Image (tube, rainbow, N blue to C red):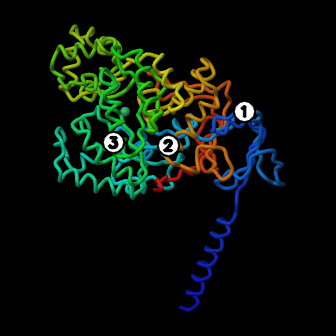
């Protein structure tokens, strides 16, 4: 008996010794001869970077120590990993923690829970991801999610005082569990019925936890400027910064009016109100078919007709998913109407009646996209994610680097990296990410600025980008030689209030 115990005791002790030995072993490596774009926006410079475990410990001219791993960057760009503030990989990360289509475009930190739709409770969600993800993950708490928790299916109305009180309590829980802000999606069914006052009340809780209010506004078309004013009013009355999600001029009637939205935001910013925005680099949006008709009169032929005119015509609306009519997938409303010898209006009404569909709608103007991108207060976001049927899920960051920076010269590479890393980090209050700086976490992207390019298209949205050579998250490789590296070093990020 005693002998057995001794034996157990010995192996137990040995295990402890081995574990602590492994933990005490530090890993260091040096990336040499890099062109460092540090995220601050300042000009690129040649240099070396030493990483120890998960932290950047030195930048400058570095002589590698004996036996230390050296990676020769050969003059290629070393940038801080990209932070995607608006990402729909919530479910995808559970299924595919390696997140190939995310890390392959240089994303190292993903914020889930945009558009009012988030995991709940956050801690349960985080527990599913802990130790199983390549990128870092943080979350917003969704306004629609809170509504659904309390109102279930009965959400097409305003909340009662008792319901709002319950929502506030659940929201408080989410902030205690590390939410970075409150998100809303007021163009979608669950959020649409909420009053501005409801959003102000919820934003006050977010303000107490130093979170932001991030909104897919009530209207991105004719009512865009009013929706923008509503978002700003919510931020001012609740006392917190506002982030406009995927800012856009969403249809033909507002094309060219980005200047008005920019002027409105500039005035607020000059007066000291903190409002910023993110933009995805495509002139087409992806959503549910019903957002085409903002009046919600989906059976009203005139309304539907007007809606299809406003987006530029039925040939601009591509069905990407449709449970009731799988054969419609990949066709435009016009193509379906032609094949069925009917009108696009009839096709729309039928699809909505039969349960709806996912659509990609090519209804934006590139000049507006460009105008928004050139503002210093806009950052890059994808509004996509793992499994996204829109190419932005796989090609956003590489598209900005290739088409907008290299080919069209809309802004310098240094500014692009700031919009992809340091600026979103600052927006989220992430103090140890988003820059190549001593003491920062080693989330890094090594890429060839002449070769980097997006390959995802509307017909092949999952085609991976090219030219992103190595991606590190917390000092460990997650992407190399065109494939995931097998490591899952992503951390759960919680907002520190
Ligand atoms: Zn959205």
| Quarter-of-image position of residue 117 | top left
Within-10-Å neighbours for mark 3: few <14, some 14–19, many 20+: many
Secondary element under disc 2, as helix, strand or loop, is helix
Within-10-Å neighbours for mark 1: few <14, some 14–19, many 20+: some
Secondary element under disc 3, as helix, strand or loop, is loop
In the image, 99 versus 310, the foreground residue is: 310
Q: Mark 1 points at which residue?
A: 76
Q: Which residue lies furthest to the bottom in this view?
A: 2
Which one is earlier in the sequence, the residue at label 3 or at label 2?
3
For marks 2 and 1, give the one nearer the viewer: 2
Q: Mark 3 points at which residue?
A: 117
Q: Name the residue under label 2.
A: 427
Residue 246 lies, with reference to residue 293, above or below; the image says below
Residue 375, percent across and down? 52, 27
For marks 3 and 2, give the one nearer the viewer: 2
| Quarter-of-image position of residue 190 | top left
Which one is earlier in the sequence, the residue at label 2 or at label 1?
1
């Amino acid at each position: 008996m005693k002998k057995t115990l001794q034996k157990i005791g010995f192996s137990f002790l040995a295990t402890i010794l081995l574990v602590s030995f492994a933990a005490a072993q530090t890993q260091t490596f040096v990336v040499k001869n890099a062109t460092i774009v540090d995220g601050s926006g300042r000009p690129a410079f040649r240099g070396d970077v030493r990483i120890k475990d998960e932290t950047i410990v030195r930048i400058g001219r570095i002589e590698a120590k004996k036996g230390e791993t050296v990676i020769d960057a050969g003059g290629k760009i070393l940038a801080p990993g990209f932070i995607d503030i608006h990402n729909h990989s919530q479910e995808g990360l559970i299924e595919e923690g390696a997140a190939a289509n995310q890390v392959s475009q240089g994303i190292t930190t993903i914020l889930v829970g945009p558009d009012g739709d988030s995991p709940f409770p956050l801690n349960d969600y985080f527990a599913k991801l802990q130790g199983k993800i390549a990128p870092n993950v943080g979350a917003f708490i969704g306004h629609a999610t809170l509504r659904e928790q309390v109102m279930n299916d009965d959400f097409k109305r305003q909340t009662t005082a008792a319901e709002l009180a319950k929502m506030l309590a659940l929201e408080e829980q989410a902030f205690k569990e590390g939410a970075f802000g409150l998100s809303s999606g007021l163009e979608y069914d669950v959020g649409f019925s909420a009053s501005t006052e409801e959003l102000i009340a919820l934003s006050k809780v977010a303000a107490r936890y130093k979170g932001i209010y991030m909104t897919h506004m009530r209207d991105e078309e004719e009512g865009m400027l009013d929706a923008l004013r509503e978002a700003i009013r919510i931020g001012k009355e609740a006392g917190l910064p506002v982030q406009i999600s995927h800012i856009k001029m969403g249809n033909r009637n507002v094309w060219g009016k980005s200047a008005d939205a920019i002027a409105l935001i500039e005035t607020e910013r000059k007066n000291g109100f903190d409002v910023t925005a993110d933009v995805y680099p495509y002139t087409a949006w992806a959503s549910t078919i019903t957002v085409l008709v903002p009046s919600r009169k989906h059976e009203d032929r005139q309304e539907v007709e007007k809606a299809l005119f406003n987006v530029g015509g039925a040939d601009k609306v591509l069905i990407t998913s449709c449970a009731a009519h799988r054969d419609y997938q990949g066709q435009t409303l016009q193509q379906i109407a032609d094949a069925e010898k009917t009108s696009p209006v009839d096709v729309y009404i039928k699809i909505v009646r039969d349960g709806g569909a996912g659509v990609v709608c090519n209804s934006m103007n590139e000049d507006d996209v460009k105008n928004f991108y050139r503002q210093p207060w806009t950052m890059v976001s994808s509004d996509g994610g793992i499994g996204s049927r829109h190419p932005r899920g796989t090609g956003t960051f590489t598209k900005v680097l290739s088409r907008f920076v290299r080919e069209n010269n809309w802004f310098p590479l240094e500014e692009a990296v700031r919009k992809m890393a340091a600026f979103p980090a600052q927006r989220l209050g992430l103090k140890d990410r988003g820059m190549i700086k001593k003491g920062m976490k080693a989330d890094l992207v090594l890429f060839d600025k002449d070769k980097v390019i997006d390959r995802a298209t509307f017909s092949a949205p999952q085609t991976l980008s090219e030219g992103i050579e190595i991606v590190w998250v917390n000092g460990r490789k997650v992407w190399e030689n065109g494939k995931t590296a097998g490591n899952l070093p992503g951390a759960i990020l919680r907002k520190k209030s």
